[in-house]
Image (cartoon, rainbow, N blue to C red):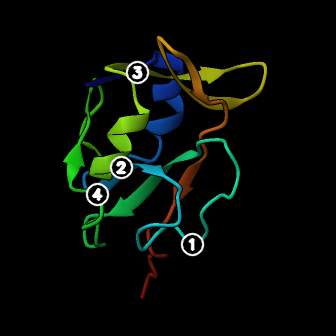
Amino acid sequence: MYLKITDKAQEKLLTYIKEDTIVILDLDDGVGEYSKVGYCSLDTSFRLLILDKSQSHKDYAESLENNVGDIYIKDYSKRYLDEAMTLDFDDRLHALQLNGPSGILDSNVPIVDLRPEKTTD
């Protein structure tokens, strides 16, 4: 399984990635410490979570091969993904989109920065 992140999507994502960050492609299904509410609809909703390396990501044990760096997922969320996926940025909608050979999986993948606020003393 491979996730190609296009140049346009990389521009949006790389502004969040530092040495001390973890990126998660989260199936927002109500399972896990960062998913507060699951959707009761028939659509599939993903989001990109940005965590600090000190934050737990125990629910996201699988790593998704891609062209940017480590991206973690819940192991069972693979069933929703095609073998070849693409994360792209739609200029018209100003949104990240997750798609594969079977079509658009999620037309609006938000980036959610969950890193704790750093305070300066």
- Can you tell which mark lies on residue 23? 2
Q: Position of residue 82 (x, y in %)?
A: 38, 23
Residue drawn 53% across the image and 48% down it: 47
Q: How far apart are the alpha carbons under marks 1 and 2?
A: 18 Å
Q: How far apart are the alpha carbons under marks 3 and 1?
A: 26 Å
Q: Which residue is the site of mark 3? A: 85
* Residue situated in front as seen by the camera: 4 or 21: 4
Dividing the picture into quarters, in which one does residue 94 lie?
Answer: top right
Dividing the picture into quarters, in which one does residue 81 lie?
Answer: top left
Q: Which residue is the site of mark 1? A: 36
Q: Position of residue 26 (x, y in %)?
A: 44, 51
Amino acid carrying mark 1 in the image: Lys
- Among the two numbered marks 3 and 4 on one chain, the one whose residue lies closer to the N terminus: 4
Tag 3 and tag 2, C-beta contact below 8 Å: no
Task: Classify residue 48 as left or right of residue 104.
Answer: left
- Among the two numbered marks 3 and 1 on one chain, the one whose residue lies closer to the N terminus: 1
Crowding near the residue tagged with mark 4, few <14, some 14–19, many ≥20 C-alpha atoms within 10 Å: some
